[in-house]
Image (cartoon, rainbow, N blue to C red):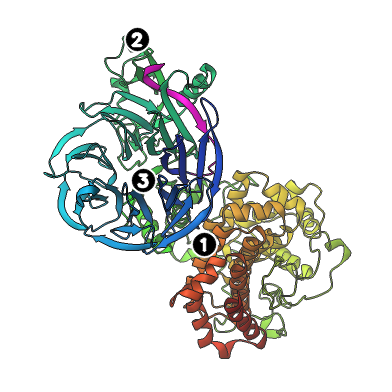
């Protein structure tokens, strides 16, 4: 029995990220889905209402954007499933069992669209390389390239009548244009959209539909190129359109809705809101049920047949989830909102006038709720709480009232719509307290973009947030351990106008001591101390923060063993490296001595600890973690010292982070751990090489503890982006400290078989090509690269089959500086090159 409106049939769980594409397996009303999690999945009906996952297809190395099903034929009696993705590849599988068959290669950028030419062996593909391609599945070769668009091709379909040998192919692109191709020659151009064309579908032999980022859907005549109808209803980008029957079609959008339309009417017949951030894709089954892929990894199936609908309890839970969502006026979900002009709850007593009609209700105290009219049930259904105001821009910028914008469950000051060269609009969330480079790197990782966009995205953030008072965070910063504001050295704040007094030392009140360090001299752990190393504060032998992890300075006492457990592992030239590097060696007495000297000379409120408080820090360094919270509070209070005095504190931090109790306290929740790492990164300044070195050593040591390792991996892209910004580094031990972090990430990738991380780390090696690394630092990078080769065979294949790649450029740079490398590093270098040849 059929309804006149669609209701939820089921929700399918399995994907771990956005479902970018869904296609119908026509033989049994199955589904093939493609996702950002780099997998495609085959779903088969398991009972009247639901589906079961039958196969997971894993041959892509980056996320999947496009899927296509090809029915059985004489050459492929099981039918085919085809997927395309960000790795530029098209993978082909047996549809019956999901067995990988072969790969089609030729596109130079992401494969964004796939389609089959009916009754032939031909496959169509569209790509961000501005081209469409026609492939022969029999010969596994590209037989034609369609060139004409000036931006990414997002859509490609076949319209033709093969019996007359007049195949018509349509392509839609980010240049706002649709092109018609007959026998591989362009014969028509369809212009009318004002933004990127995202999807195409044929209505009949003479008409087709297109949808666009201009929020509209258009109906076209194939031969005349005349726009016959424009369908208006969506309030944001329309990503996908599909025919449901001969006279009805469906569309999905960034406005979180699925809409059902009649070809002959320009308003939607039904609107279904979804409890997800973005609705990417839609297709229809042969029984006219609709399948939708969403940004939270779920697949939703809707039906008009009451025998296939979900239970009343499941439908109620689905509606409640929708009602509890937040609708962003700033991102175009409902348009502009002026709260004072909105009606109160009495408006809900009046029935709506059409299916999908929306209204907003002023609940008082600035609270606005959104409702949608359900014609079938004759009721207003709550679809969310409205946040934002008319002061917001289309880009999602913060309003003048300082309201936050919710994006994927978190609140931000800004949520920008960013269009890069590929023509794809992407969401860029940002808080004014974030580092623009952190936000940019997170954005690049999320969308798996090239590192070439890092500076462009960061500058975009900086340019578009100039109106916000970012520097205010210096004075407003609250130390997560002490609750106090962070000390900002005089002379560094843009608000400081005290002139010459900016060089006053807050410890002594006199002119600031600037260490006389020769920038051309590299620090060495084996260098003998002379009178030139006397401490200007004490006159004693100077504590120099340059301990190498390769050579211990003195035996460790039993009391220190709980913190400094063993000697640092000796590096070998073996591949892969499987044991994390740690930076454990230290002369505790000299570190504490320097801390006490600086403390004795400190002046100012809260800048000097009492003797018994210094003793607490002494105990912490030597492994006594009783009252760990109190002891850490004391230690972190000292980070208010001037930036050129905090290196002994950072040295202590890199040692105590090895202690399980300390690591557990700092990393027990995201808020505390993020604030801790963010504060450390404020001290990454090129003129403070000792601070930079100890921060890198702290990051290295975090891998030795489960909680620290988890944090380093969870935040790997933002951390790597931040440390790579510090390049180039001129000091030997700072180079070693940075390369130890890189090596530990490579080791994790190998130990966990994380190919995605190995791909990202391999991309990072382009940053090392133009930098002169000292021998020990170069050795660690070589060990890391060899470990990546043992992790990911595709990287080896890339080096073996391409003339220009990151590894070869890195090897070439090392060859040029071979005279500066020691025998161990040269041996490691040769073994790494041999590894590539032998794998």
Q: Nearer the viewer, mark 2 or mark 1?
A: 1
Q: What stretch of residues is rendered in magenta?
A: 1-17
User: Which residue is pictured at 56% across the width and 88% down the height?
Assistant: 818
Say which residue label 3 marks: 416
Q: Quadrant of residue 228?
A: top left
The magenta stretch spans residue 341:
no
Disc 2 packing (10 Å; few <14; some 14–19; many ≥20):
few
Q: Nearer the viewer, residue 357 or 625?
A: 357
**Drawn side of residue 21 relative to residue 524, left or right:** left
Residues at circles 3 and 2 in contact by the CB criterion of under 8 Å? no
Residues at circles 3 and 1 in contact by the CB criterion of under 8 Å? no
Judge whether residue 684 can be spotted in this image: no
Say which residue label 2 marks: 346
Q: Is residue 310 above or below residue 297?
A: above
Say which residue label 1 marks: 760
User: Which residue is pictured at 55% across the width and 39% down the height?
Assistant: 53
Q: How many marks?
A: 3
Mark toward the start of the polypeptide (3 vs 2): 2
Q: Nearer the viewer, residue 77 or 577?
A: 77
The secondary structure making up most of the magenta span is strand
Q: Nearer the viewer, residue 342 or 559?
A: 342
Q: Position of residue 278 (x, y in %)?
A: 41, 38
Residue at mark 2 to residue at mark 1: CA–CA distance: 56 Å
Disc 3 packing (10 Å; few <14; some 14–19; many ≥20):
many
Q: Position of residue 567 (x, y in %)?
A: 79, 70
Q: Nearer the viewer, mark 3 or mark 1?
A: 1
Q: Position of residue 740 (x, y in %)?
A: 63, 69
**Residue extending furthest toward the front:** 74
Judge whether residue 21 can be spotted in this image: yes
Quadrant where the C terminus is found in the figure = bottom right
């Amino acid at each position: 029995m059929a309804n006149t409106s669609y209701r939820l049939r089921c929700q399918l769980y399995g994907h771990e990220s956005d479902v970018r594409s869904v296609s119908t397996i026509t033989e049994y009303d199955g589904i093939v889905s493609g996702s950002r999690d780099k997998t495609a999945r085959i779903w088969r009906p398991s009972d009247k209402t639901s589906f079961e996952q039958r196969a997971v297809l894993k041959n892509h190395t980056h996320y999947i954007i496009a899927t296509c099903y090809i029915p059985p034929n004489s050459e492929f009696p099981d039918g085919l499933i085809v997927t395309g993705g960000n790795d530029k590849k098209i993978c082909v599988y047996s549809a019956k069992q999901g067995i990988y068959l072969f790969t089609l290669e030729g596109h130079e950028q992401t494969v964004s669209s796939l389609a089959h030419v009916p009754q032939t062996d031909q496959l169509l593909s569209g790509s961000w390389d501005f081209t469409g391609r026609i492939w022969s599945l029999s010969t596994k070769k590209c037989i034609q390239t369609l060139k004409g668009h000036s931006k990414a091709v997002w859509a490609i379909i076949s319209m033709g009548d093969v019996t007359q040998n007049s195949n018509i192919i349509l392509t839609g692109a980010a240049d706002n244009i649709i092109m018609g191709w007959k026998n591989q020659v362009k014969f028509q151009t369809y212009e009318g959209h004002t933004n990127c064309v995202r999807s195409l579908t044929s209505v009949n032999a003479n008409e087709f539909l297109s949808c666009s980022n201009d929020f509209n859907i258009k109906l076209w005549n194939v031969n005349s190129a005349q726009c016959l109808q424009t369908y208006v209803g969506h309030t944001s980008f329309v990503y996908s359109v599909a025919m449901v029957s001969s006279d009805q079609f469906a569309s999905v959008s960034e406005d979180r809705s699925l809409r059902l339309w009649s070809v002959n009417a320009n308003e939607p017949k039904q609107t279904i809101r979804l409890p997800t951030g973005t609705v990417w894709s839609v297709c229809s089954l042969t029984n006219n049920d609709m399948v939708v892929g969403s940004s939270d990894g779920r697949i939703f199936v809707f039906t008009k047949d009451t025998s296939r609908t979900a239970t009343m309890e499941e439908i109620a839970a689905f509606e409640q989830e929708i009602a509890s969502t937040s609708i962003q006026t700033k991102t175009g979900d409902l348009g502009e909102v002026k709260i004072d002009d909105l009606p109160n709850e009495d408006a809900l007593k009046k029935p709506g006038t059409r299916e999908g009609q929306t209204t907003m209700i002023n609940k008082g105290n600035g609270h606005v709720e959104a409702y949608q009219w359900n014609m079938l049930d004759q009721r207003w259904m709550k679809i969310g709480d409205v946040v934002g105001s008319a002061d917001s821009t289309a880009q999602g910028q913060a309003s003048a009232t300082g309201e936050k914008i919710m994006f994927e469950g978190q609140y931000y000051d800004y949520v920008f719509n960013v269009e890069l060269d590929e023509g794809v609009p992407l969401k860029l969330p940002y808080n004014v307290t974030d580092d623009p480079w952190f936000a940019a790197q997170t954005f690049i990782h999320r969308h798996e973009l090239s590192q070439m966009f890092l500076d462009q995205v960061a500058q975009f953030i900086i340019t578009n947030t100039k109106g916000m008072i970012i520097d205010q965070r210096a004075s407003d910063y609250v130390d997560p351990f002490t609750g106090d504001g962070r000390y900002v050295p005089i002379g560094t704040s843009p608000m400081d106008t005290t002139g010459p007094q900016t060089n006053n030392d807050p410890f002594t009140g006199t002119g600031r001591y600037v260490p006389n360090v020769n920038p051309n001299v590299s620090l060495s752990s084996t260098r003998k101390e002379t009178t030139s190393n006397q401490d200007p504060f004490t006159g004693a032998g100077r504590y120099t923060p340059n301990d190498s992890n390769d050579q211990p300075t003195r035996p460790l006492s039993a009391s220190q063993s709980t913190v400094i457990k063993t000697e640092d592992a000796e590096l070998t030239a073996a591949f892969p490296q499987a044991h994390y590097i740690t930076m454990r060696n230290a002369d505790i007495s000299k570190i504490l001595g320097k801390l006490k000297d600086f403390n004795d000379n400190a002046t100012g409120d809260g800048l000097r600890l009492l003797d018994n408080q210094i003793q607490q820090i002494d105990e912490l360094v030597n492994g006594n973690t009783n009252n760990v919270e109190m002891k850490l509070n004391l230690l972190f209070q000292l980070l208010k010292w001037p930036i050129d005095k905090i290196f002994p504190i950072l040295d202590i931090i890199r040692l105590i982070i090895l202690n399980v109790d300390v690591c557990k306290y700092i990393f027990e929740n995201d808020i505390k751990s993020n604030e801790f790492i963010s504060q450390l990164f404020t001290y990454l300044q090129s003129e403070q090489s000792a601070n930079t070195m100890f921060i890198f050593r702290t990051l290295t040591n975090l891998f030795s503890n489960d909680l620290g390792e988890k944090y380093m991996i969870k935040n790997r892209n933002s951390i790597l982006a931040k440390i790579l910004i510090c390049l180039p580094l001129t000091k030997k031990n700072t180079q070693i400290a940075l390369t130890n972090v890189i090596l530990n990430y490579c080791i994790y990738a190998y130990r966990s078989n994380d190919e995605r991380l190995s791909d990202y780390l391999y991309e990072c090696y382009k940053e090392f090509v133009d930098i002169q690394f000292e021998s020990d630092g170069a050795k660690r990078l070589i060990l890391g690269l060899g470990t990546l080769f043992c992790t990911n065979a595709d990287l080896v294949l890339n080096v073996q089959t391409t003339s220009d790649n990151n590894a070869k450029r890195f090897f070439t740079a090392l060859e040029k500086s071979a005279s500066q490398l020691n025998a161990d590093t040269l041996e490691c270098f040769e073994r790494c090159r041999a590894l590539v040849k032998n794998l």
